[in-house]
Structures are given as C-alpha cells and as structure tokens.
Image (cartoon, grey):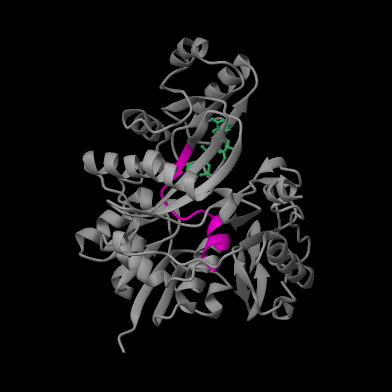
Amino acid sequence: MIVTKVLVIGGGGREHAIVWALQRGRRKCEVVCAPGNGGIAQTATCVPVNVKDLGDLIRVVAEQQPDLTIIGPELPLSLGLVDEMQRRGLKVFGPTQAAAQLETSKGFAKEFMQRWRIPTAHYAVCTSLDEVHASLPLFHVPMVVKADGLAAGKGVLICKTRDEVLAAAEGLFSGKLLGVAETRIVLEEFLEGEEISFLVLCDGKHGLPLAPAQDHKRIGEGDTGLNTGGMGAYSLDSLLDSHMTEWLMTHVVQPTLDGMSAEEMPFTGVLYCGLMMTARGPMVLEYNARFGDPETQAILPRLETSLLTVLEAAVDGKLDSLELRWKPGASACVVAASAGYPGEYKTGDAIIGLEETAKDVAVFHAGTALKRGKLVTSGGRVLAVSATGDDLQTALGKAYAALEKIHFDGMYFRRDIGHRALSKNS
Ligand SMILES: Nc1ncnc2c1ncn2[C@@H]1O[C@H](COP(=O)(O)OP(=O)(O)OP(=O)(O)O)[C@@H](O)[C@H]1O
Ligand SMILES: [Mg+2]
C-alpha cells in the first residue's frame, strides 16, 4: 500500500486538528508536523522549524520530501513558501504570496472587493495623516481604523469619535501602536450585525464551502474585555441556511475566485470570509487566506470525508468533482488559556487529567510542550476541547465535562461558548 507523507506547517491548535483529521481519515498517511507541539508529538513526528524564516522552512521541506504540504499559519504564506515550493514542483495546499494578499494587505483586499463588486464596508485607504483628515468627512462615527498588514488581531481599532480616529491613525503611522510603522491604513464604516466565519476550500477556480462557524474573540464572558486569538468556536448548519450559503457562493466566493484568476493570482487554499450579517445583507469584514483558529478545531470534527482526499483535490484543481459529507448536528470547541492571557502569563505548569477525558472528545493542544516526558503549558492559549453532538447543547456539555477533568495552574476558559445560538433557540 502506498502511504502518503504529509507535512503540516505550524504548531497551534489548528494544526493539531489538521493532524488529527488526517490521522483518523480512512486513507493511511504518515504525518510530520513542523514545529508541532507537545500534543501533536504524541501521535506524529515533530521537527523543529522557525516558521518566520523562509530558508529554514525550505530546509525542512527538502529534508522531509513530503507528498503534500499543508500550511497552517499566515506568516509562511506571506513569506512566499507556496511560491518556492511550486517552483520546486512540490505539492502544497495554500495560496501563493500574491494570492495571500487577500489577507496580508487589508488595502489590497478592500480595493479588490471594490473592483469585483463584493459586498463590504465603505472604506478609504490612506497613506498619511493628511489623507485621513481629508477622508474623515466621508464617514459617520463610530469608525474602524485598520493596519494594512498582518497584526495578529491587534491592528483593528474601533473609534467612537473623529479624534479617536486621528489618534489611532497617528499611532499606526508612527509605529507607537504595533511596534512597526504602517505605511498604509484603512478607514472603514462601522458595521453592525452577527459575525460568521465562512471558510471555503478553493482550487483556483472552484469553491467548496465548509460547515459555517462562529468564533469568540474576547477574553471575557458576554464578549467583554480584550481581544484574543479566539476563546472558542462552534459549528452549526443553521448559522447559514442553504439559501444564504448559495448567495454567498454566488456573490462573494465565486467573484473572489474569478477576480483573482483574472488578475493572474488564482487562489488555492482556504478562503476564510469573515462576514458581518448586517441589515443591508452580508458584508465581508475581512478575508483570511488559511484555516481559522479556533474555527478549524470545531469544523474538522464534523467533517466525514477524508481530509487528505479533499486537500489533494484542491491542489489538483478538482474540487468540482467532490462533495463533502458532514456529521449532522453541531460541534463546539472551548479554549483553555493561561491566567493573564492575552496579557502576560507564565508557562511551564504541569497539565494533568487529560487521560480522564471521555473518548468522544478531542483535546487539541496549542501552547503545550513536553518537558522531561511531562506535558506543560508553553503558551497563552494552552489547549482546546472539541466535541460533536446532535445539538449544540450536547456538544458543549461534552466539552465542558472534559474541561472539568483537566487542570493546570491558573487555567481559564469561557463558560458561555455558543451563547448567541443558545439564546436564539430558547
Ligand atoms: N467594519 C467593521 N465594523 C465593525 N466591526 C468590525 C469592522 N471591521 C472589523 N471589525 C471587528 O474587528 C474584528 C477584527 O477585524 P478584522 O477581521 O478585519 O481583523 P484581523 O486582525 O484580520 O482579524 P483576524 O485575527 O480574525 O484575522 C472583527 O472580527 C470585527 O469584530
Ligand atoms: Mg485577518
């Protein structure tokens, strides 16, 4: 039997979920993860890599000779890892550096959406404070100010007054806010509505939607407090009914794919459409060019089709011949974080109780490491517990029951994951 060798780049909860989905699929594959983490290392080979260093990433790829590489995080995409691999004739799932601009430059994404008439908030791209001053009369407050480039969730400021807009713009241009001086920023109309994460697999021409999900970005219950990388997510078909999914495929996804092809940067990989469901209809808040974290930890446990087959079809341009099968019902994923996150937090604390969790939940590690054979915390978001069920309440019940068994010093998790959907149903 031919065993496909798959290399997964990254080392967070998203990558653990990808590795887990590959390993439970019907098709046998050997999975290597670079750099991986303490949890991934329990079932797959982990090899060290600096994901910020293109040369080092290429070194790992050359050493491993994988049949397929899956790139988890945005940084290697922004460095052009896909371009380098394609030049070497290697199969890789993810967009090229040019195609990844949908995520890596908000100015590019907004101008692209305008060119292709994809619904999004009104905006202005500014390269100086003078331009910000000149654009201000075109907007009502509140307004949103965004850094153009990747900012790991820290580059978006909601401003209630024009003075706040000017202060935010000044902070971004000067480098005071993000540590690096932005040369371009985006001003945006403030939109109201429910946010949905709509992830679509793309092969350059065709899009195949994944089950819809909703993320919980704030640290505190009731969506309060600081922004985080994501404290939990759930997937439920009713987040987007079939009509809305079709509308989004016709008015957002297909025009995006057609536009990117027409501009000679066809998009292969996951097109993550961050949507705001406004009174005027769905609007694209942002694109990401990769699987979402933690949405992936909620979505993949529902996927019944072999992930390997699906991702190979995407790389081969054959997504039109594929239909995805999903577990009906719902899934939920709850993130456990270190005390203090998203601010300062300590690491190196022992994690116990994992072996006591029920067999039908999956524990995806994010910030964990093996120290002398023992699992310890090594990041802000430490792990996520995911479960599926006939309905959201059942899935959440399983995830929270498992979290009661797990312990590390200062462990924090939100107890209200899925609250919007639950309050709608009651
Ligand atoms: N125009 C807008 N109106 C209202 N809220 C907005 C708007 N744009 C962004 N936001 C809020 O800010 C959050 C982050 O914005 P955006 O997704 O553009 O930034 P990001 O840093 O790329 O996020 P991510 O880390 O999810 O990729 C959104 O999830 C949304 O809650
Ligand atoms: Mg983004």
* Quarter of the image where ligand 1 sits: top right
In the rendered view, tell whether residue 332 sits above or below residue 175.
Answer: below
x, y percent for residue 290: 43, 53
Q: Is residue 85 magenta?
A: no
Residue plotted at (58% across, 49% down): 239
Q: Is residue 291 magenta?
A: yes
x, y percent for residue 188: 50, 25
137 left or right of 310 in image: right
Residue plotted at (59% across, 30% down): 157
Nearer to us in this view, 263 or 135: 263
In the rendered view, tell whether residue 356 sits above or below residue 239.
Answer: below
Residue plotted at (47% across, 56% down): 291
In the rendered view, tell whether residue 98 sits above or below residue 160.
Answer: below
Nearer to us in this view, 121 or 157: 121
Q: Which residues are magenta?
A: 285-301
Q: Is residue 171 visible?
A: no
Residue 125, located in which quarter of the rendered image?
top left
Nearer to us in this view, 35 or 386: 386
352 left or right of 281 in image: right
x, y percent for residue 414: 74, 54
355 left or right of 330 in image: right
267 left or right of 212 in image: left
